Amino acid sequence: MTTEMLTLCFAARPSPNGELNILGATDIIFVPQFPIAINCYLVAKIRFRKIEEGLKEIKFSIIDSDGKQVQPAPPPQQINIQIPTGSSSASAAIVVGIQSLQIPRAGEYEIGLAVNGRQEMTVPIYVRVPPPQPTGQTPAIPE
């Protein structure tokens, strides 16, 4: 099993033909103040090999820099992996929408992905207040 992608984004939709449409994938979020609630999506794309077919439980977590859950984790997702005849692997896209993710303060957070209870990947998410802009200048887009 290989985790090909794990991200937070602002819109996501898997399509029936296997495409995964994502808008606003990011690892840094600028917000005007704290605490704040945001609407977002957690997205993972996982590739499974033939020997890994079967039912899988997918769990996402969101923790702060102290290792505490930001809010209760989204419910686990159940997927049944079936590898098509003639293929050596298949991928699964998991999209979970989160309404009103509570962010109490600026800092570093972590999104985690677990499959069947085993942590497979984590990625950092940085949440900040944008730096003040000099009067009359357009904000720069971070790289």
Image (tube, rainbow, N blue to C red):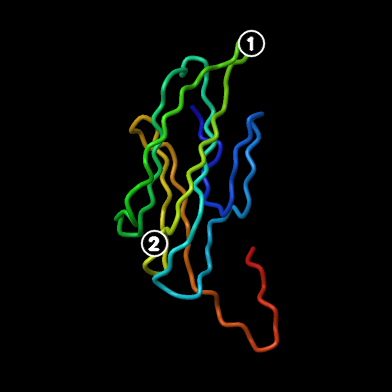
Q: How many marks?
A: 2
Instruction: State the image coordinates of residue 16 (x, y, percent, origin top left).
Output: 63, 30
Q: Earlier in the sequence, mark 2 or mark 1?
A: 1
Q: Is residue 46 above or below residue 51?
A: below
Please rate how many residues cluster around mark 1, counting C-alpha atoms within 10 Å: few if below 14, some from 14 to 19, many from 20.
Answer: few
Q: Is residue 109 above or below residue 86?
A: below
Instruction: State the image coordinates of residue 52 (x, y, percent, origin top left).
Output: 46, 19
Which of the 4 image quadrants contains residue 106?
bottom left
Give the Cα distance between marks 2 and 1: 45 Å
- Residue at (51% x, 35% y) in the render: 3
| Front in this rendered view, residue 73 or 45 | 73
Q: Which residue is at the far bottom?
A: 135
Asked which secondary structure carries label 2, the reply is strand
Residue type at numbered disc 1: Gly
| Front in this rendered view, residue 131 or 25 | 25
Q: Is residue 50 above or below residue 71?
A: above
Please rate how many residues cluster around mark 2, counting C-alpha atoms within 10 Å: few if below 14, some from 14 to 19, many from 20.
Answer: some
Relative horizontal placement of residue 32, taking residue 103 as reference (left or right) = right
Relative horizontal placement of residue 86, taking residue 8 as reference (left or right) = right
- Residue at (50% x, 75% y) in the render: 32
Residue type at numbered disc 2: Gln
> Which corner quadrant holds the C terminus?
bottom right
CB atoms of marks 2 and 1 within 8 Å: no
Q: Which residue is mark 2?
A: 102
Q: Which residue is mark 1?
A: 86
Residue 124's label in the rendered image is none
Which of the 4 image quadrants contains residue 70?
bottom left
Instruction: State the image coordinates of residue 21 (x, y, percent, origin top left).
Output: 64, 43
Asked which secondary structure carries label 1, the reply is loop
